[in-house]
Each structure stands twice: as C-alpha cells, then as structure tokens.
Amino acid sequence: MAEKRPEVVVITGASAGVGRATVQRFARDGAAIALVARGEAGLEGALADVEAAGGRAIVCRADVSDHWAVDAAAARAEHELGPIDIWINCAMVTVFGEFAQLTMDEFRRVTEVTYLGYVHGTHAALQRMLARDHGTIVQVGSALAYRGIPLQSAYCGAKHAIRGFSDAVRTELMHRESRVWLTEVHMPALNTPQFDWCKNKMQHKSQPVPPIYQPEVAADAIHFAAHERRRELWVGGSTAAVITGNKIMPGVGDWYLAKTGYESQQYDGPPSESERYNLWQPVDDVEDHGAHGAFDSRATSHSVELFAAKHKGLLAAAGVGAAALALAGLLRRS
C-alpha cells in the first residue's frame, strides 16, 4: 500500500500570533506547510517549529496585499509540496484610534491587508482547488465581524467585509455543487503580539478586551474547522455572547460600547514613541516574537464552546443519559 502523502497547508500570517500557533498545531500532525508572511525572523522561527516537529515547510515571504505575490506563493507551494488541501487566511494589521484620527492611507492599508489579503488568498486557493474539486479554505474571523467596536473602525470594517465576501463565495460553491469547502472561525480576544505591534493613536497602551484567550485555543479551533464541514465556528463564550447579543439588541451594544469600549481596550501608561508598528513594514524581520503576546498571566487556555463544538455527540449522549436517569427517578417516586 502506498504511503499517504502529508496534508498540504498554506497559512498566511504564519510568522506570529494566531498564524504561528496554527503552524505549530498542523506541524504536530505532520502537515507540509507553506509559511506566508513578511517578517524574516518570524518565518524562520515558524520553519524551525515545523522541522522540530519532524515536518516539512517552505518559507514564502510575501505581503498579502499583493495578489501576484500571494498567487506566486500558492504556485510555489504546489510545486514544492504538492496540491494544496487547506488554505488558511490569517494575516492582519490594524490601527487603534478614532476614525477621525486615522489617515486614509492608514485605513486603506488595513483594508488591503486584513480584507483584500483574504480575497487574494481565497482566489489563489480556488484557482487550484476548483479544478480538483477538493480543498478547504478557512477564514480566520472575529466576533468583530458581527459587532463593530470603537477605536477599531478599519479592522472591524475589514472583518465585516470578509464575512460578506465569504457568504457570497460559499453560495457560488454550493451552486456549482463543488466539494471545495469554505468556513469561517470567529475568534475572541487573543493574547498575541499584535497589541505591541499595531499602530496606536490612543492615550494608553492597547490591550485585548477581556476575557483573553491563548492563541493555541484559536489554533485548535482552526485545525478543527479545517477538517469538519462547518459553516462557521464561534470560539469562546465572549464571541457567542457578542454575536448573539448583537443580533437581538444591537442598540444596547451601541450604548454599552460607547460607555466601556474605550477603557477596555487600553491599560497602563502611554504608548512609547519609539515603538515600531507593523502597518507598513514587519516588526519580526530581525527578532522572532512567536505566538504569544504580553498577556499570558491574564489569558485562558480553554474554551468551553470549542469543547462543545468538538464533542457534540458526547454531550448529546450525556444529555440523553441525564434525562433517562431523571425519568427513572421520577418513576421510582411515583
């Protein structure tokens, strides 16, 4: 019997944060991974992670806002690793600050990377997957794809756009009766380096809105979604609460965020004037920053919602069993 070839996976934003944790998760399964990002040191660190796990990877240094560079990375992945099975769009940049403070160049740059980068990745993947009628595309989304918050207008706009774009493409795939699958994984606040890297126009340092989850939670969810045909996956209780609450009472969300949304995204003293940010250039070009940010002591490594999504059968059986025991108890007392 011929040996089964390893899964071929392309991950954008692979050098740090959620993308880096996702590289590590797929590497444990022996996947062959194309690492797409800008930062040279971060990419080399990701390559070392894969090789330490006994896997194979290639470094494709590219800016996802350039669709030609993304397509070239896809072509190289297929040439050197084989047909792409899974494409994961994860690259992002952001700017913290009121919309009125942002320049249009800043807003455009966030849109080009965080939204159009997903469009470019999806297009490159489909150009190869459709002909084979095989493959999965994972869009790494956010609770902010449903509920915009203050001080992140460009990022929220991009995440909303990804959701609308993905809905449209999904229906086209369904019309074709294609077996190529597109899924979205909507994330909570995560402990990643982006809060040290983002351009910050606020009065204080930026932070994720608590509760905060470790990037490995996100990576586990992405890995699960890549292998299960789910339309969407919500990660974390806060994500479920935000999305559900916004559907029921969006006006209440407006009021609440106007009151709390500024303070909850800031902490400590003013941002350093000397800090580098990754809007235009990578900040992990010289130093590898890995998957984690500065909030390890405040972050959790577990998501009840993700556990429930992964164990629906077990939980259903437990529910049936509990109901049967309750019914038996009632019958004994009658």
Image (spheres, rainbow, N blue to C red):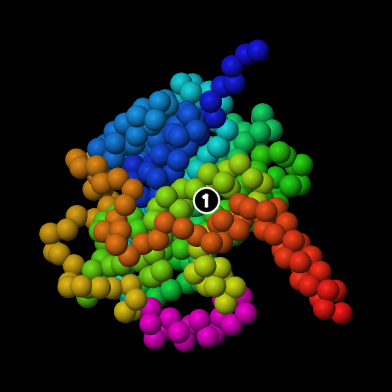
Quadrant location, the C terminus? bottom right
Please tell me in which quadrant of the rendered image residue 209 appears: bottom left
Q: Main secondary structure of the magenta part?
A: helix
> Which is nearer the eye, 170 or 71?
170
Would you say 171 lies left or right of 60 here? right
Q: Which residues are magenta?
A: 246-261
Would you say 251 lies left or right of 270 here? right
Q: Amino acid at mark 1?
A: Ala
Q: Residues within 10 Å of mark 1 (few under 14, many from 20)?
A: many
In the rendered image, the residue lying farthest to the top is 1
- Location of mark 1 (residue): 221
| Residue 264 seen | yes
Spot occupied by residue 227 in the image (x, y as percentages of width and height): 61, 41
Please tell me in which quadrant of the rendered image residue 196 appears: bottom left
Quadrant location, the N terminus? top right
Above or below — where is 266 with respect to 89? below
Please tell me in which quadrant of the rendered image residue 274 appears: bottom left
Above or below — where is 99 with respect to 187? below
Determine the residue positioned at 38% across, 78% down.
261
Spot occupied by residue 332 in the image (x, y as percentages of width and height): 83, 74
> Which is nearer the eye, 323 or 262?
323
Spot occupied by residue 205 in the image (x, y as percentages of width and height): 23, 69
Determine the residue positioned at 69% across, 33% down.
133
Spot occupied by residue 156 in the image (x, y as percentages of width and height): 45, 66
* Residue 36 forms part of the magenta stretch: no
Determine the residue positioned at 28% across, 67% down.
206
> Which is nearer the eye, 109 or 321?
321
